[in-house]
Amino acid sequence: MTKTRAIQVARAGGPLELVEREIPNPGPAQVRVRVEANGICHSDVLTKEGLWPGIEYPRVPGHEIAGVVDAVGDGVPSWKPGDRVGIGWHGGHCGYCDSCRRGDFLFCTVRPMVSGISADGGYADHVVAPAVALARIPEGLSAVEAAPLMDAGVTTFMALRHSGARAGDLVAVLGVGGLGHLGVQFASRMGFDTIAIARGSDKEPFVRKLGARLYIDSQAQDPAAALTRLGGARAILATATSGAAMTAVIGGLGIDGRLMVVGAPRDPLTVPAGLLIGGRRSIAGWASGRAIDSEDTMAFAVRTGVRSMNEPFPLERAAEAYERMMSGDARFRVVLTMDK
Ligand SMILES: NC(=O)c1ccc[n+]([C@@H]2O[C@H](COP(=O)([O-])OP(=O)(O)OC[C@H]3O[C@@H](n4cnc5c(N)ncnc54)[C@H](OP(=O)(O)O)[C@@H]3O)[C@@H](O)[C@H]2O)c1
């Protein structure tokens, strides 16, 4: 068998189309992974719509990859065929710029590589990736369970870890989609007093099951006022795809409270300076994680029972699966599976 299936975007704004390609071979320091599952992240819109600078088309999206190593290039001592691995947003780096030497691979200034954007990603039966980008999947997680943890999981887990909140603090999660439903679970398992904020009332039973103590419907009440009545949040994990929605919760931060921005809306956040100065509030961004962070995320998930709630779709229905994610109707992560 020399052919493999992939879902490609031929041009910015073009459709997701199923194609047959030659099975790619790993070069030096690379491995080839037989993909078993790939989570569909809202950030795939960057590849689909050409919103990231310099994308070369055709391009195969996908940066929530779980599978099995099936070929290893030269100079890869640490991986062998049969190893179960995941690949996330981080798809490689130069290794010698100042950012890389600090371990900040995601901010490599020379050759930043993003899976599914600067190289073909996981909407495919096979993917080639740098060995340094691989995270080992632990026993106890299936490929479908592991895939969403490679970006939605690691992003929310790491952002909460760096939010400044400590066990017992009030932590809100804004937006309950792919990232947010994992954020609610991580926050509650980390020992935070967890509040979920989303639009409408239909998500309330879900978020309570996921571990939130309270639910705030941002259409029925002012979420900042509601958080203030609860004492103010030490951190808000903002996963929503709306800058206006993020702006609307900033006033609900308590003293020294921090808005951790992980959602990437196209509209801006607008903040009166007095709101930041008054309560020493701050706004910080967080980007995904490295392979070792994904391993921490998966280990925590296995220990505490955090799991992505997934809607599996076969690879050939990727276009429908992507639309399902974009519609906001998915409960909560759409995951492509490659079994034929
Ligand atoms: N920082 C990072 O490293 C990183 C990593 C992965 C993803 N992201 C970004 O994170 C965002 C979320 O990704 P995802 O995969 O979780 O997307 P998703 O599954 O589509 O979820 C987005 C959620 O945002 C909610 N939302 C939109 N407008 C809202 C509003 N006005 N008020 C409250 N909630 C609102 C939606 O709620 P409804 O269901 O009510 O529409 C939906 O649940 C995207 O912008 C993505 O690009 C960033």
Image (cartoon, rainbow, N blue to C red):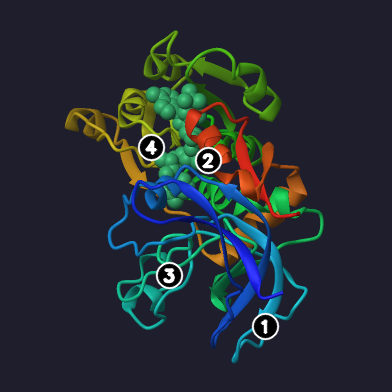
Q: Give the alpha-carbon distance from disc 4 to disc 3, as whole Å.
A: 24 Å
What's the mark number on residue 78?
Answer: 1
- The reply to whether discs 2 and 1 touch (Cβ–Cβ < 8 Å) is no
237 above or below 12?
Answer: above
**Mark 3 or mark 4, which is nearer the start of the sequence?**
3
SS class of the residue under badge 2? helix
Could you tell me which residue is drawn at 61 percent across and 17 percent down?
A: 204
Residue of label 2? 322
Camera sees residue 262: no
User: Which of the 4 image quarters holds residue 23?
Assistant: bottom right
Residue of label 4? 259
- The reply to whether discs 4 and 3 touch (Cβ–Cβ < 8 Å) is no
The amino acid at mark 2 is Tyr
Q: Quadrant of the N terminus?
A: bottom right
91 above or below 192?
Answer: below
Residue 111 locus on image (x, y percent):
35, 75
